[in-house]
Amino acid sequence: MRQLRPIPVIALVVVSMLLAACGVTSSPTPGTQATAPPTSAPTAPPPEAGSLTVLSLWGGSERANFLAVVDGFTAKTGIAVQYETARDFLPVMRTRLAAGNPPMIAIIPRPGVMVDFAKDGALFDLATLDITNLADNYSQAWLDLGTAEGKLYGVAVKANSKSTMWYKPASFQALGVEPPTDWDGLVAIADKYVAAGKIPFAVGGKDSWTLTDWFENIYVRTGGPEKYSELFGGTLPFTDQTVKDAMKRMAGLIAVDKYVAGGRQGVLGTGFVDGIGRVFGTSADAEMYYEGGFVGGIAIGDVNPSLKPVEDIAFFTFPQIDPAHGTPLIGGGDLAVAFVDNDLVRQFMAYLSSKDSADIWASTGTISPNKNTDTSKYPTPLAIEEAKQVAGAEVFRFDGSDLLPGTLGEQWGTTLQGVIENPDNIDSLLNDFEELAKAEFGR
Amino acid sequence: MRRRVRRLQGFAFTAPALVLMTVFLVAPMLFTIRLSLDTGRGFQLREFVGLDNFVRLLTRDRLFLDLSDFPPSGAVFNNVLWIFLYVGLCVGLGLLIAVLADRVRYESIVKSIVFLPQAISATAVGVIWLLIYAPNARVGLLNAGLGAVGVDPVSWIGSRDMVNYAIIVAAVWAGTGLAVVVFSAAIKSIPSEIIEAARVDGANPFQTFGHITLPLISLPVSVITITLVIGVIKVFDIVYIMSRGGPNGASRVIAYSFFEETFQAGKVGYGAAVAVLMVLLIIPIVALNIRRFRAGETVR
C-alpha cells in the first residue's frame, strides 16, 4: 500500500497538466472570430511575433511557383511566410476552423467554398483589410468571382484555361492529322487512332473533377453560355434536356471502351496525374488528355521532365460543337482569402493583388488574372498560348462545379462517375442529383 | 470511519482514470450525439433537426445503405463484406500458416515474411497495392501479368464490382501477419504430451487440429477475430488512399462516409449521425469481447 501511494499523486499531476493544456487551447484565440462578425476587434498577434501562415493545395511544381511569388514578398518586406500544402484541402480547412486555428490566409481553388466560408462569417472582407487596388488590377469578372453576399472577399491570384485539349504533335503528325476545330473532327481523329491500333484518350476520372470539367466544356458549347450560367447558378434544373444531351455526348466519347485507356473502368480507376502519365509519361499508352492549362506544367515539371514543349506536348482549344455557341472558354481561378486581420495579412493580400506578384507568377509560367501583368514574362510558348487564350476569349465562364455550393460540387463529380460507369442511368442519376440541388439552392 | 476512508481511497485511485475518460471519451461522445441531432455546420449547434439525419441516412442515402437491389449495397453493406472476407481470410490464412509453419524448419523465415507487412503503415500498403493494381499494364504488376497471358488489363480500382475485393485483398496482405504470430505462439504453448497422446490414440493431423489444437487456442482465435472485426468497422485509411470511396461511392465504408460527410461536404451533423451509428455497432462487439475475456480468465 505504501509503495503505491505516489501513483495517484503522479496521475493527478498528469491530469492537471492535461487539463491545463486543454485550458490553453480553449481560451479565446483568433479562431473565435469564426463565429464573431469579422468587424469585431480581431486578435492580431504582434507583427514582430513572426511569420505569416498560408495554406493551399498546391504541391510539386505549383508549390514551387507559389514560393517564387512568396520570395518576392519576403525580399520586399522582410516578412517570412510559412507555406503549408494540404492536398485534401477541405477537411484540413474545416477542422482548423472548428479548432479556432485557421491559417491566416488560404488560397481556395473553388469559389463556391469561399462563399460557404464567407456565409459562416469566417472571412475578413477586403474593404476591412484596406485593400483598394483591386479595381485597377482586375476586370469585373474576376471581382465578381471573389464576391460573396455583396462583399469582396477573394483576390484572384491564379487563372487557368480549362478548355485545353493536350496532345502529342509528333503523334498527330504520324497519324497525318491536324488539331481539330470541331467535335466531329475530334471524333474522326479518335476513330483514326483506333483504326491505327492506338487509344485516343486517357481520362483521370478517379478524380471526379476531371469529369466535371469535361462536362462543362461540352455543355457550354451545346447548351450555350446563358443556360450554363443558369444551370450552375441554381435556376435551371439539372434534369433539363440540354443537360441530358450534353451528358450523352460526353458518354459517347469517354464512356466508350475503345476510345479511352483501360476502357470505361480505366477512366474511373485513373487519377488526374496518372492520366497525364498515360499520355505523356515514359510508359504512355494513350494519345490525348483533356484538362486545364496546368497540365503542361505538371507533365513537364513532375511527370516526365524529358518532354519538349511544342514538340512533344501542346494543346488545342476544346473544339466547337454547335456553331451557334462558338468556343466559349471555361476557366478556373484560385482565390486568396483572409481568416485573420493583421498587418502581415494586409500587406500580403495587397501584394497578391499587385502587378509585382502577377509578374512573378507570369515568369513561372502561371497565368495571372491580373490585367496589368507583363505578358512578356511568360517563359514558354505553352504559357504564352494559354495566356492568349484566356485574354482573347470572347465568352468566358468559370468552372461550374467550382461555383456550386460546397457539398454539391463533390456530389456532381460523383454523379458524373456514375454516368461513365453506366450511361444508361443518366436520367435517374440526374433525378437524384436534382433532389440534392433543390435542397441546396432552396428551389 | 474506516469504511469512509476506504471509500475515499477507492475514489482517489479511480479519479485520474475517471477524469481522463470524462474529458477525452464521455464528453466528446455526448457532444457527438448532440451534434447528430443538429445540422452542425462549422461544428457548432445551429439548428435542431431531431432524428432527421438518422432517417435520411438509413432510408434515403443510397451511398450509405441501399436495400433496393440484391445484393444490397452502400457503406454499411461494404462493411459487412469486409467483416466476412477480411476477418475470415485473416483468421483462416493465419491459422493455416501458423499450423503449417509449425511443422517446418524454416518457420522463423516464413513468419518473418508474413509478419513484415505489419510494419508497413496502411498508407504505404495502399500506395504499394495501387501500383500493383494500376490499370496501365505498363505500370501495374497485376495487369502486366494478365497481359502476359493475353488478358486485357482490368481497372481493379475503377470497377464497381472489383474495387471492394481489391482493397480487401491488400488489407488481408497487411493484416494476416498479426494473426499468424499470435496463433503460432498459442500453438507453441500447447503441451506436446497432449498432441502426442492424440497421435498415439491414432488421430490423423486433421483430427489433431480439429479436436486438440483448435479448442486449445480458441481464446486467442476469438480475441483476434473480435479485434479484427472492431478494426474493420473502423476501417478508413486504406480505402481513403486506394479509392477515396469511389468509383461513384462504390467502396465507401461507414468510417469513410463519416469522413466524407463531415469533412468534405461539411455536413457535420449528418456525419455525427454516421459516427453514432458506428459506435452503436461496435458496442455489442466490445461487450462480447469483454465477456469472453472474463470467461476465459475464470476458466483458468
Image (tube, helix red, strand yellow):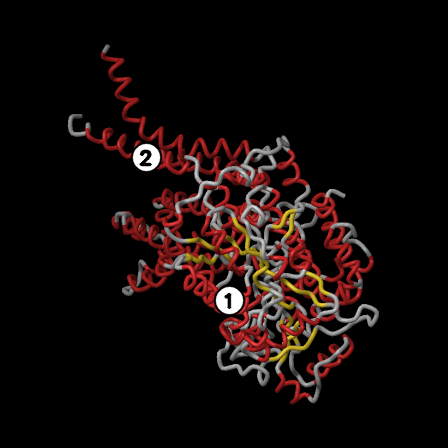
* Quadrant of the drawing holding the C terminus of chain A: top right
Indicate left or right for A278 with A196 as reference. Answer: left
Q: Is residue A101 visible?
A: yes
Labels 1 and 2 positioned on one and the same chain: no
Q: In which quadrant of the rendered view does residue B35 lie?
A: top right
* Quadrant of the drawing holding the N terminus of chain A: top left
**Where residue A281 appears, x then y in whole percent?**
53, 77
Q: With respect to residue A120, does B89 lie above or below? A: below
Report the residue at 40% width, 32% height from top.
B23
**Where residue A435 appears, x then y in whole percent?**
74, 46
Amino acid type shown at disc 2: Glu
Amino acid type shown at disc 1: Glu
Q: Is residue B79 visible?
A: no
Q: With respect to residue B84, does A380 lie above or below? A: below
* In the foreground, A256 or A272: A272
Element at badge 2?
A: helix
Indicate left or right for A384 with A97 as reference. Answer: right
Mark 2 is surrounded, within 10 Å at the Cα level, by few (under 14), some (14 to 19) or many (20 or more) other residues, namely few
Circle 2 sits on which residue? Answer: B297
Residue ranking furthest to the top: B1
Report the Cα–Cα distance between label 1 and label 2: 59 Å
Circle 1 sits on which residue? Answer: A62
Q: In which quadrant of the rendered view does residue A219 lie?
A: bottom right
Tag 2 subunit? B
Q: In which quadrant of the rendered view does residue B295 lie?
A: top left
Camera-side mark, 1 or 2: 1
**Where residue A426 appears, x then y in whole percent?**
75, 58
